[in-house]
Amino acid sequence: MCRLRAILTLLDLLSSFDTSEQDRMTEEFKAFVKKFEAKVIPLHKQAALAYFSATISGKEEDYSRAADFEVQLTRVFASKEDFETLKRIREANTLSDPILRRQLDVLYLSYLEKQLEEGKLEEMIRLQNENEKKFSIFRAEVEGKKLTDNEIEEILRCSTNSIELEAAWIASKEIGSVVANDVLRLVRMRNEAAHELGFANYHTMRLELGEQNSAQIEALFDELDELTAATFAQLKSDMDAKLAERYDVAVENLMPWHYQNRFFQEAPKIYDIDLDVFYKDKDIVALAKRYFAGLNMPIDDLVEHSDLFEKEGKYQHAYCTDIDRAGDVRVVCNIKPTYNWMDTTLHEYGHAVYDKFNDRSVPWVLREPAHTFTTEAIAMLFGRFASNPGWLEQVAGVPAGKAQQTADIMFQTLRLEQLVFSRWAQVMYRFEKALYENPDQDLNSLWWQLVEKYQLLRKPEGRDQPDWASKIHVALYPAYYHNYLMGELLASQLHAYICREILKSDNSCREAYVGRTEAGTWFIDNIFKPGRTLLWNDMIENATGEKLTAKYYAAQFVN
């Protein structure tokens, strides 16, 4: 009896020790987060504002200022002392509160990436910003005239003169030669950093730090290749016949500049429909404001702080930035009254409403999308509506008869866009993976091997230039592009769920949620507000009843 009492007493003491240790760790982590937020929240805002200003002005001093803030922010995450604290608390595995545990995981991964020698980190940031500046100020030159990206795209889209098309396409690739050496230098530096942190290469590291599994992503892309290859090949054959007629060349003489954009990442116009005609006299921004207001997700305040039209020296692409995770969300565009810019504007404000309608009661660390591809999914879902007949009628004011007459062609156009993009994403994912696995291989040849295999394009005879480096994502946003295609999968999954379960609609091809506040409420409550409190696949399963799957994308665009 005495022995039993002694054992029970010992167990009580051990339990008491465990409880006190748990309490101590919990309080230590709470104190860490409080100190972290005091440093990072104001610095994050300053860095975001500086970057926004730099991309608007294009001035070297503004990019330098943005880089300085980025360096300061990086130094916080590079702290060896902080990282050891996080590592110790994580290994103790005593935090019981799920929100605290989630913050710990997110912070640990954020710090892990920066556990490098400080000088090396700063050099990488400054080189990255230098490349960003080169892209911002680059203007392709054709016959002595400097052209913006928009002007190059207009030539590729509208001209039927093969000589003019070739000149514009080649000029657009010159940025590759400008940045290629710096990009390779960055690739090697990133790989060295990944090796120091125990990863095979930087590409693998980026996936794993983003809570993605390399084998899982590879399997997904293999599945999508198998799903789309045959259908794309048939569409490509139809496309080639129509393009050959348009440009008065033999099918076997079609070249990359005949596909109406710089990378064949968007569908050329092969159907008898000009989507630009729906937007040529429209106020693109006003249409976007009207649409999101109808979902009870107004964007007027966001538009007021955004920069949406072309300026000299300004960043030529489009992006959305969450300045403070507390409602100051801004968009940069270079809007023209075209279908592509309507798509892009809806896309970027899709990102923006995701950020605007976060849950302010969620800790700052978790007040961001569940993953980069989940915010891409929302952006893509809204962007698709630019060619949706229901959206065109109800928002853009296109006469019902006209929209209905072109409904089938508009869907075929969207389907073509999806499949063209899907094959382009295969090129990007597989090139980047190979680039970081072996940056010393013949990258110029590798690029064209992948383009020929997945996009079925012909390499121009004798072409041996770093065309891969002319794609801004390869240079500036490494190991990110696969998220776009994952976003498309999720966009289809979300759309199917909303039509079936929320709106009870059996006409998903025309459904664009116009004026349906219940759809907006569902997005806010189930996608936006959870933020990063859940792993991305858990969030998707909670919202739709299923983890991420390709079946809805296939049902919508392939089958």
Image: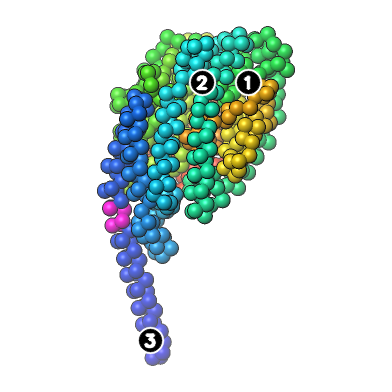
Which quadrant of the structure image shows residue 309? top left
Which quadrant of the structure image shows residue 86? bottom left
Neighbourhood count class around disc 1 (C-alpha, 10 Å): few under 14, some 14–19, many 20 upward = many
What residue does disc 3 label? 5
Q: Position of residue 544 (x, y in %)?
A: 50, 41
* Residue drawn at point x = 45 percent, y = 32 percent: 131
Q: Mark 3 belongs to which amino acid? A: Arg
Q: Is residue 88 visible?
A: yes
Q: Mark 2 belongs to which amino acid? A: Asn
* Residue drawn at point x = 53 percent, y = 21 percent: 172
Residue 434: within the magenta? no
In the image, which residues are magenta? 30-35
Q: How many marks?
A: 3
Q: Alpha-carbon distance for marks 1 and 3?
A: 83 Å
What residue does disc 1 label? 256
* Residue drawn at point x = 43 percent, y = 51 percent: 116
